[in-house]
Each structure stands twice: as C-alpha cells, then as structure tokens.
Amino acid sequence: MEPIKVAVQGALGKMGKEITSALCREPGMQLVGAVDIEAREGSLAKPDGSGSVPLSSDLDSILKGCQPDVLVDFTIAQATMPAVHIAAPRGVNLVIGTTGLAADEIKEIESLAIAYQVGAVVAPNFALGAVLMVHLAKLAAKYLDYAEIIELHHHLKADAPSGTALSTARMMAEARGKPFCVPEQKQAARSRGEQVEGVAIHSVRLPGLLAHQEVILGGPGQTLSIRHDTISRECFMPGVIMAIKKVVGHKGLIYGLDVLLGLKEST
C-alpha cells in the first residue's frame, strides 16, 4: 500500500515540529512538504535524519510540487481559511486543529469539502484524554444542575476561553437538554467568568502551563471534578495520526475527535 503523503502548514511552530516528527515515525505515512509564514524558500530537514522536504511560505507551490494526500494545519484561523480555499480545489484532504474557528468558518469548510469531494477533520482538541474528559462531562451533566469550567493554558495562546472549554459547555448543555442553573448572587461579579449555557468559564494564561481543563459539577451536598492535563504536545499526536488515516477515505466534514473514537455519530 502506498504511504499517505502529508504536508504540514505551520511546520516551524511548536505543534508543527511535533507533527513533522510524528509523521516521520509513523509507518505508512510520508512527510512530503512543509509550509510556514516565516519560511524562506528551501528545505526542511526531517526530524529523523532521513532527508529533507521542500519548505516554503507559499502553500500553493508546495501543494502543486509535492501533491500531498493530506494537509495538516494547526495555525490560526486567519491562515487556516485561505489554506482550505487553496487545498480543497486541488483535491487535498484536510486535518485542522486550529482553535478559534467561528461556526460560519466551520460551515464554510464543510461546504468546500463537499463541493470538491475531499475529506476534512476539524477538532477543537486532538488529545484523546481531553475528548474522554468531555464525554464524561456530558454524561455527568444529566444528573447535576450546576457546573463551572476552569481552563488553563500557556500565556501565548491566542483565544480565551479556549475552544475546548466553549465546546465542552455547549455539549454539556445539549446533553441535559437545557442550560445549567446559575447560582443566585446579590450582585453580578466580573470575576465569575464568561457565562456559556449557564456554565461559568474561567481562563488562566500563565508561562509554565501547557493545556489543562477541569470541569466541576455540583449538586446538593456534593461536587464532581473531571480534569485533564496535557503534559507535552506529544499527547496530540495519536489523535492527529488517527485523523490522517481516517480523512483519506472520507468525503465531507467530520467535526470532533469523538466521532473518530466512536463516542458520537457523525452528523
């Protein structure tokens, strides 16, 4: 069987470097090209020392010259959406881990994937443990009426609250069929976080953190805490590899790693 040929956008960033390294370790996959806004025309040495691949700031030239099966993008929304418009017409499948994509942008990705008959996997979080955390929180949401989320990330993270925290709150409310109860207070307090479906989300941004989230649910006389901690960016790689394998045999959009794990049906 021919290896799956993959190009990486944002290859010089922290996640990009982790992804290129994982691709070089994975049997059945081949890193064929790299794109980064900071790149000069040239080549990128493969992390395993097995050679190099073309590197450019021009995505179109990389896709034309390397002809990948899949483009992996973990950048920012302002870079991801132009990339989708370039890759989809070329028949390149997409694996996107960019946070901060708006609902209309996700719908646009879906429309382009259908129009050009390519696969697209978009997920707010590629860590398997984080996906399981959300799944467990959805189960608990049916039985406890109060909930808050504390999400902690490194100080360079562009968005707050995180995409994972926002989607967690919304999916928990969807699972229970109504918003959570909001504790009564004599006066509104700015420190109570951003309210999403009755869930107060508290965002922490500090050097030394990577990605962490705790869901705390409460009821009369009890609380339940569900927490996931990302120790290193290596935790995202099994999810990325899984998405690459899945997307080449799919047409249209798959949103969320929970679909790939069989925890949720694709809509």
Image (tube, grey):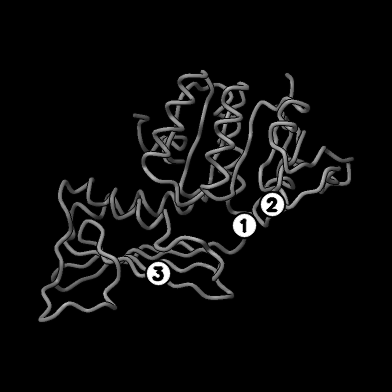
Q: Using the numbered discs, state the Cα–Cα distance from disc 3 to disc 2 in whole angstroms.
A: 25 Å
Q: Amino acid at mark 2?
A: Glu
**Residue at 74 percent of width and 34 percent of height:** 27
Closer to the observer: label 3 or label 2? 3
Left/right placement of residue 108 relative to residue 64 reads left
The answer to whether residue 68 is above or below residue 255 is above
Question: Can you identify the residue that label 2 sits on?
Answer: 18
Which corner quadrant holds the C terminus?
top left
Q: Position of residue 137 (x, y in %)?
A: 31, 55
Q: Which mark is residue 203?
A: 3
Q: Position of residue 17 (x, y in %)?
A: 72, 52
Question: Can you identify the residue that label 1 sits on?
Answer: 233
Q: Using the numbered discs, state the Cα–Cα distance from disc 1 to disc 3 in whole angstroms.
A: 20 Å
The answer to whether residue 164 is above or below residue 55 is below
Q: Residues within 10 Å of mark 2 (few under 14, many from 20)?
A: some
Q: How many numbered marks have been drawn onto this rendered protein structure?
A: 3
